[in-house]
């Protein structure tokens, strides 16, 4: 019989792409993880993982199972939290997942204003790249997402949008519009919203520059200010650097790139009224939000 324990182990193995790392995270032995995965394979009747060089990878069937297993494990965790909250006459915090690009300029100020006005509100904040945020929302690991446009393949509902202009920036004197093709472009990793914006701008300019991946928005900003290359950042994130002449905007034919941020919940019955009410409070706390009811 298929068990939740098997699904929980499978999700960790898929997250880590390693039996040994999964065993460390679960605080069990590697043979125990391997035995659970073997039992899961026998129960389902198909291979979920396969050898990939010295590591492992999900099969096509494994990727399908991973999507459902994430949701089931996430629902279980959510059910336990809600049950404990009821038992102890408490309220489970609303979980907000967001891209790192939005933390300091948008999400933190909004939550700060809400805390000042409503001390009874309980919330937590999770930070990841765009793909991680959408995965968390689909898997019931978070209640509200605030990042770039959600994928059309998932049942998400956009409640509001916020304008976002992306620009190409560089250290003063380090490059010029006609030399962007010869410049090194500093970019976020695949799956990050800023990476997709940068890729779109590079493609729009028909460039094929050298790319260097930077692991966080703060590090990306610092590296551009240090003159290591050019990069794409939200205009709101570079205002101070522009005023202090640590950065300049490099004009192009395809920028500023307008790609609004989306405030999103799960569609249909996935978001209860408490979650929707909290999202409404966030919208009221920042006049930049524009209401919408589009379903993605």
Image (cartoon, rainbow, N blue to C red):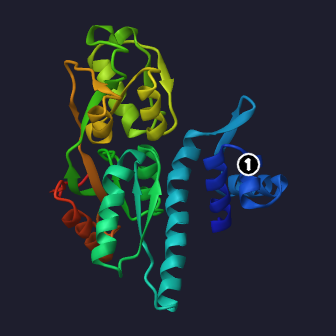
| Residue 151 relative to residue 85: left or right | left
Measuring from the top left, give residue 82's x and y in whole percent. 47, 80
Looking at the image, is 172 positioned above or below residue 93?
above
Q: Nearer the viewer, residue 101 or 238?
A: 238
Side of 271 where 212 appears, left or right:
right
- Residue 92, by quadrant, is bottom left
The residue that label 1 is drawn on is 21
Residue 231 in the image, given as x and y percentages of width and height? 38, 26
Give percent across and percent down for residue 126.
Answer: 46, 58
Q: Looking at this view, is 80 or 179 the one in front?
A: 179
For numbered disc 1, what is the local secondary structure?
A: helix
Q: Quadrant of residue 76?
A: bottom right
**Does residue 160 appear to the left or right of 103 in the view shown?**
left
Task: Identify the residue at horizontal 30%, vertical 57% (top origin).
Answer: 264
The N terminus - image quarter: bottom right
Crowding at mark 1 (Cα within 10 Å: few <14, some 14-19, many 20+) = some
Q: Residue at x 37, y 22 (%)?
A: 171
Residue furthest to the front in view is 244
């Amino acid at each position: 019989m298929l068990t939740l324990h098997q699904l929980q182990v499978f999700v960790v193995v898929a997250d880590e792409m390693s039996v040994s790392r999964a065993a460390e995270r679960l605080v069990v032995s590697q043979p125990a993880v391997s035995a659970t995965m073997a039992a899961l394979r026998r129960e389902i009747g198909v291979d979920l993982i396969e050898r990939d060089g010295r590591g492992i990878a999900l099969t096509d069937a494994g990727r399908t199972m991973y999507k459902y297993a994430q949701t089931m494990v996430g629902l279980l965790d959510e059910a336990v939290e809600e049950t404990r909250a009821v038992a102890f006459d408490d309220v489970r915090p609303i979980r907000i997942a967001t891209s790192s690009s939005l933390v300091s300029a948008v999400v933190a100020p909004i939550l700060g204003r809400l805390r000042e006005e409503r001390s009874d509100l309980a919330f937590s904040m999770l930070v990841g790249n765009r793909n991680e945020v959408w995965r968390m929302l689909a898997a019931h690991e978070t209640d509200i997402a605030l990042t770039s446009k959600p994928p059309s393949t998932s049942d998400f509902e956009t409640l509001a949008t916020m304008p976002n202009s992306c620009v190409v920036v560089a250290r003063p004197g380090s490059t010029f519009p006609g030399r962007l093709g010869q410049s090194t472009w500093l970019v976020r990793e695949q799956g990050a919203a800023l990476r997709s914006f940068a890729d779109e701008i590079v493609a729009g300019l028909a460039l094929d520059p050298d790319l260097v991946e930077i692991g966080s928005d703060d590090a990306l900003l610092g590296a551009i200010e240090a003159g290591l290359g050019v990069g794409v950042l939200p205009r709101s994130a570079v205002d101070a650097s522009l005023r202090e002449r640590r950065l300049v905007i490099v004009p192009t034919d395809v920028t500023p790139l307008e790609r609004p941020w989306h405030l999103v919940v799960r569609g249909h019955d996935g978001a209860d009224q408490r979650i929707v009410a909290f999202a409404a409070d966030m919208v009221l706390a920042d006049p930049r939000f524009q209401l919408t009811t589009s379903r993605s």
